[in-house]
Amino acid sequence: MGTLNFLTGNQGKIAEAENLLGPLNWQIKSFEIEGGVPEIIEPQSDNLTTVALAKIAQGVELLASQNRLNESLLVEDSGLFIDALPNFPGVYSSDVLKSIGCEGILRLLDDERTAYFLTVAALWTGEAVEVFVGRCDGQIAREIKGQGGFGYDPIFIPDEIDNNRTFAEMTKMEKSTISHRGRALRALFDFLDENGA
Ligand code: IMP
């Protein structure tokens, strides 16, 4: 069984990656140094790929400092992009959720409601960095709907599933089949499967 170090303080992300592993023989482990998740500096950029690459570069330096450069390392960043609000919340999705919440986003929008979620996963294979992107297109709902999920799930209606349901009204399995994160991680695991990285 291979081990994939995941550089994140978010246990939910680790659980989602574990769920997606399915039949593949990879164990996901939180990347820790001396018992703690290391601090990573978030770069100033409105581009998720730039952010993920800057984080994996810092992670690789940390691996090197531990003489663990031959191990794999994963970082994953996601954001909600709303066409009517260029670059917002985008890379600031986490801070915007904390400050104005889903209600605040609904107040900012009129009839133009198209949006998408994007995930960029950057993987250090032990030799090189590979990038995987997942996207999910949809609409921002007119009201908060659903009890499940997290973050912006109660206001995001993906295009691919009927009945105008938000992510928060879906099962975890339904969401991960079409979600940005599900797509990026499946592409990553396909890569690991093929390359045994
Ligand atoms: P992160 O990079 O995965 O931490 O995502 C940044 C922020 O985007 C999170 O704090 C969430 O608020 C939001 N977000 C990311 N993915 C999702 C999702 O699948 N559903 C709802 N909100 C999400």
Image: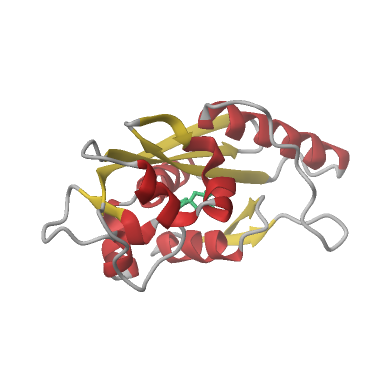
Q: Residue furthest left?
A: 163
Q: Is residue 138 left or right of residue 69?
A: left
In this view, the residue in front, 112 or 193, is 112
Q: Residue at x 55, y 37 (%)?
A: 122
User: Which image quadrant is residue 2 in?
Assistant: bottom right
Q: Residue at x 50, y 32 (%)?
A: 131
Query: Does the image show residue 186?
Result: no
For residue 137, side relative to residue 160 (left or right): right
Q: Is 156 left or right of 160, judged from the image as shown?
A: right
Give above or below for 79 relative to 54: below
Viewer can see residue 34: yes
Percent across and percent down for residue 63 are 78, 41
The quadrant of the image that shows the C terminus is top right
Q: Residue at x 58, y 55 (%)?
A: 98
Q: Where residue 67 appears, x then y in whole percent? A: 85, 42
Q: How many marks?
A: 0
Residue 60: x %, y % from top left: 73, 36
Q: Residue furthest bottom?
A: 147
- Identify whether 59 is placed above or below 148: above
For the point 60% across and 31% down, the residue is 51
Task: Where is residue 44? Give x, y as percent.
Answer: 66, 27
Tell me the quarter of the picture where residue 62 sits. Answer: top right
Which quadrant does the N terminus fall into?
bottom right
Depth check: 110 or 53 in front? 110
Viewer-side residue, 38 vs 157: 157
